[in-house]
Structures are given as structure tokens and as C-alpha cells.
Image (cartoon, rainbow, N blue to C red):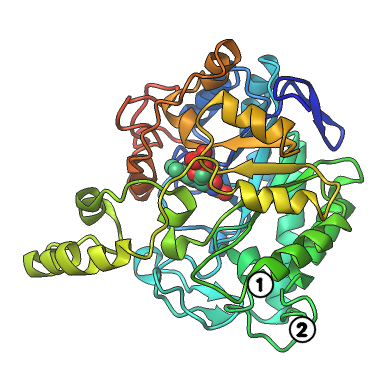
Amino acid sequence: MELFERAYIGKCELSNRIIRSATFEGMCDEKGFPTETYRSFYEQLSKNKIGGIITGFSYISDEGKAMQPGQAGIYSPEFIPYYKRVTTGVHANGGKIFMQLAHTGRQTREQETGKEVVGVSTKRSPYFKSKPRTLKPKEINEIIEKFGDSALYAQMSGFDGIQLHAAHGYLIHQFIFPKINNRTDQFGIDKKKGIGTKFLDLIIANIREKCGEDYPILIKISGGDDHYPTFGIKQLINLIRFLDEKAIDAIEISYGTMDYALNIFRGDMPIDLILAKNKVFRSENRLEKHFIKLIYFPLFKRRLKPFSSMYNLAYASLATKYTTKPIISVGGFRTGKEMEHAVKIDGINFIGLCRPFICEPDFVVKIETDSNYKSKCLNCNYCAIMCDTQSVTQCYKTKSNGNTTESNSNNSGK
Ligand SMILES: Cc1cc2nc3c(=O)[nH]c(=O)nc-3n(C[C@H](O)[C@H](O)[C@H](O)COP(=O)(O)O)c2cc1C
């Protein structure tokens, strides 16, 4: 396989094997409707020869909304004309766009949203800390329907496919994970496989029923998480084997949960910015600030994994041995050479990139000309920390997001 050749996800043809991984935008209004900033952002991004673009995580129901302001939603037919404008702009540039669908589950805070937190069990996230109420089977079935409905709205809006967010500790991942899922009903952990797949299974079936055989369904999973040793290689292989038998079209392999979000992104931990902007650690109390900065964070930092190039590639390579479905590897790709190697030698079908596109939307054009070209991304993670604020996602070093609008405040979606 070559990096720069046409390739398929289901029946959807992409112009090359490079994918923009889901990246939270912070460009929607308080009800989740895409603003003009969102529309023009994707229109601009699609001018840059990216094989396929996956949107940021979009909530499928009100209680499934995450804490970040400006998150995209898709939970009623009312959204269709607004997203149609988005997909029309992307398609006019020859681009392909997939919508990522998510339910946050326990990864949110009641004190920020004023809403009850629900999850697979009452187990709290060590980071978000709110105690979730366990979802009843009837509510789980309703959420499954809502995933199917949202996928249908995405299809009617012209998206080329959807991606189920089953990674990073969000609700689908909470059902998969043995450490979080302690249910004893049909949605619990399969003792033989060591993972919980019933919820995901029914979501995939629901989407297929509503969107038809040919509509591309992608899925993003976490290949591992050192903080949850009950999900190891055996469980990963069982998850890949499960997905191999399902009607899905590509599997993207990331890492971890939002409990240690910097293990998903890797790189720097900008402590002062976290203290100023992060909703969990933000503090006006000087003593508390000192404690967090001088004692808590240095200890926390020890639990983080360092950035290295292509840091999730081993999981993706392993996955190729257990499935014939296309595999997308994401995490730490920074040069064309690395991507070419992963495709040609490791047999990875697609390469996912997030931060390189935040600072250089034209990154593909640059590596197509020179495969040694290295992304300007410094892995400073300012972009990630700022997701908690009203600002749109952008690079704080190069001040670029492919768009000039920095705040969303006067920009209504509806
Ligand atoms: C600012 C920011 C926003 C992100 N938003 C999402 C998201 O909405 N959904 C998702 O699955 N991953 C999200 N991610 C994770 C990325 O898709 C990707 O898995 C991770 O950043 C590693 O890739 P990279 O090294 O190319 O940045 C986000 C990452 C960053 C830095």
C-alpha cells in the first residue's frame, strides 16, 4: 500500500490514506447547532488534500453532552439543514467528511452542567469525580435508538459516514471496560472475552437498520490503558475479533481515557494554563493553587507517558493480525516518512492526525511535496487544555485553526 493512493472505507473512496482524526471544535452554539464558524472551518480544511475528515465528538442526546462549551450536537432532524451546509462545502472541494458520534456517560461534572451524570455503573471517574447513576436497561435501549437516530440525521445531512466514539472513556468505552462495567445484566462483561460488547453490538445493528448496508460506520477504540490493567492485550484482541465480525468499515486505534487525558495526547503538561483554565483544577485559593502546582501535579505527572513518534502504532499493527477491516492508527505521526513506513511496512491502512492539522491545515500538501517535512506541532497541548474554555480550537503557538475567528460568543448556529 502507498500513502498517496486512493483508498476505500466501505464504499466511500478517499483520495489518499490520511485522515484528520476527530478534533473537538468548540464552534457550535449552546444547543449544539453548528455556527458559521464551524461551517467555514470545515470548508477551509477540506481544501487541503486530506483524504477524509472526521468531525469532533458530537453528542447524540442532551444528557450525553460533554462539559466543553461549543460542542456539536446531532439529536433531532432540526440539525439536518445546518449540517447540510457543512457537508455541501466540503464536497464542493472534493473532500470527504465523517461525523463522530458520542455520549459522554460519566465523563462530566454535575457542578458544571447542573445535570445528573449517568453511566454504566456507579463507579466514578477519578478525574471528573461525579458519582454516576447507573443506567437502567430501558434507558440503555433508548440511548441505542438515539445513536441510530443520530447516525440517520448525519446521513441525511450528507456526511459520508459516521464514527462511533468507543474510545477515551466515553459511554461506549465504559461498557467495554471491565474495571468500570460491573453490571450483572445482559450489558455486563462477557466472562470469556473479558469485555462488554452488547451495548456496542446493538448500536451497530441499530445504525445498520436505519442507515442501510452501505453507509460507512467507523469506530474509534482505545488499544490500551496502563491505568486499567484489566483491559490488556487479550481483551484488545477479543475486541478486534468482535469488530471483525460486525458490519463496520474501519477501526481507529487510540489510547486511554479522559481520566489521564494527557496519555491520549502525550507531550507537555502546561501546568499554569491548567491551573488557570481547567474546570477541575481551576482555583482562586492561593494555598490550594500552590499545593496543586508543587505537590499534586508533579506526582500526577509521573503517571503520564512521554510523547514518542507513532505512539499507538504497536496496537494498530497487532490489530491487523486479527481483522481484515481497515485499520487507522492515530497518535504521534509527525512526518510523511513515518506515515509511509506505517502504511508500506506495517500494513496500516490509514493514518490519523489531529494536532498537526490544528497548527498546519495544509500539512498534507507539505508532506506530499517533501516526505521529510516535520509538523510544526510542539505537542504543547495548549489546544487540548483550551477545549474547556469558550475559545474555538486553535494552535496557540502558530495562532492557526485554518480560520480567523477565535471566539464563538456572537456566532449563533440557529
Ligand atoms: C484539541 C484536541 C481535541 C480532540 N478532540 C477529540 C474528539 O473530539 N474526539 C476524539 O476521538 N479524539 C479527540 N482528540 C484526540 C485526537 O483525535 C487524537 O486521538 C490524539 O490527539 C492523538 O493524535 P495526534 O498525536 O495526531 O494529535 C482531540 C485531541 C486534541 C488535541
Task: Name which quarter of the figure residue 194 lies in.
Answer: bottom right
User: Helix, strand or loop at disc 1?
Assistant: helix
Q: Is residue 323 visible?
A: yes
- Residue 191 shown left or right of residue 32 in the figure: right
Residue 209 appears at what percent x and percent y?
Answer: 89, 54
Q: What residue is pinned by disc 1?
A: 175
Residue 367 or 277: which is nearer the viewer? 367
Picture residue at 27% right of the left edge, 68% below the top: 299
Q: Nearer the viewer's eye, disc 2 or disc 1?
A: 2
**Are the residues flagged by discs 2 and 1 in contact, CB closer than 8 Å?**
no
Crowd band around label 2 with a 10 angstrom C-alpha radius: few (<14), some (14–19), many (20+): few
Residue 12 appears at what percent x and percent y?
Answer: 82, 31
Q: What residue is pinned by disc 2?
A: 191
Picture residue at 82% right of the left edge, 55% below the top: 322
Amino acid at pointer 1: Phe
Q: Residue furthest top?
A: 369
Amino acid at pointer 2: Lys
Picture residue at 52% right of the left edge, 27% below the top: 335
- Residue 201 shown left or right of residue 235 in the figure: right
Q: Is residue 206 visible?
A: no
Against 1, residue 126 (above or below) is below
Label number found at residue 303:
none
Measure the alpha-carbon separation of dots 2 and 1: 14 Å
Task: Name which quarter of the figure residue 27 lies in.
Answer: top left
Q: Residue furthest right?
A: 213
User: Helix, strand or loop at disc 2?
Assistant: loop
Picture residue at 34% right of the left edge, 34% below the top: 407
Residue 97 appears at what percent x and percent y?
Answer: 67, 31
